[in-house]
Amino acid sequence: MTTLRWLHLSDFHTGKDGYGQSRLFQYILEYVKSRVESGLAPDFVFITGDIANKGKPDQYKEFNENFLLPLIGLLPLETQNRVYLIPGNHDVDRNQTRAVQTYGILVRIPEFLDPNEKGQFERSQAVFPRFRAYTENDMINTGEHWLFSQGGVFSNSVSFGSKKIGILGINTAWLSFSDYDRHQLSTGKPLLEDGLEKIKDCDFKFVLGHHPLDWFLDEELEPICEPPREC
């Protein structure tokens, strides 16, 4: 039997607490180093949002220089290509497109989170600027960023032993607007379904999102959750 190990990290809020941040970075790096040296290195690394505290470029620069690059340097070569990063609500720059009210936008523009040209256009007008600092400082997803694509998600399949691992990264912060986001958010059911279709043949699937399910719009919980599980 092949053992699969992964490291899941989230909610760094870089820029909120300088000294505490540096200590946290150092603690995690030392832990990862000890795991690698003992032969228990992670096979995958998932970093699921709130990299920055307020979505500012200098906060991502600090994260990249003081944590992400040193972390990648500690990992085995094969794991270095299996580091995955998605945004959270603190990766939204609220100073951008301030006049756009995202709550209720799916009622006004039902196709807003569709995986097509129309959906991409509507998102580009309303929310893309809020994620600009995140995408421009994302060292993992280079080139044309998946956040700004028609599909609005990223998917990847990796052979691991005799199994095929599917990785789907989603953005649960599309509609993040304030400190009262709970029950107001959506990953976009069409975007999610389209992304899941791309990894349907994988033996194991990881879906990476930042928010707990109960932060989503109430009407979206039932199709997302599988009975008899309660959200």
Image (cartoon, rainbow, N blue to C red):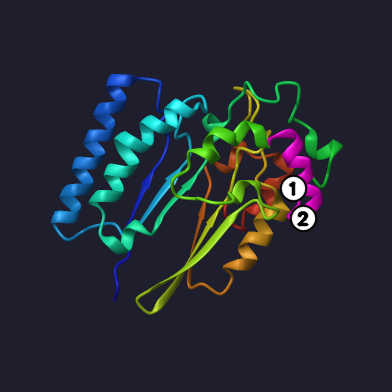
Q: Is residue 107 left or right of residue 113?
A: right
User: What is the span of residues highlighted in magenta in the rendered image?
Assistant: 112-127
Q: Amino acid at mark 2?
A: Asn
Residue 211: in sight, yes or no?
no
Callout 2: SS: loop
Residue 41 percent across, percent down from the top left? 24, 57
Q: Is residue 158 left or right of residue 102?
A: left
- Give the mark count: 2
Q: Is residue 203 left or right of residue 73?
A: right
Cα gap from disc 2 to disc 1, whole angstroms: 6 Å
Using a 10 Å C-alpha cutoff, classify the residue at mark 1 as few (fewer than 14 neighbours), some (14 to 19) or many (20 or more).
many
* Along the line of sight, the residue nearer the viewer: 191 or 186: 191
Residue situated furthest right in the rendering: 108
Callout 1: SS: helix
Q: Mark 2 and 1 residues: CB-CB less than 8 Å, in contact?
A: yes
Residue 155: in sight, yes or no?
yes
State the residue at coordinates (27%, 20%).
Answer: 19
Residue situated furthest left in the rendering: 38
**Placement of 28 over or under 75, stated as above or below:** above
State the residue at coordinates (32%, 59%).
Answer: 79
Using a 10 Å C-alpha cutoff, classify the residue at mark 2 as few (fewer than 14 neighbours), some (14 to 19) or many (20 or more).
some
> Residue 120 — which label?
1
Q: Which residue is mark 2?
A: 116
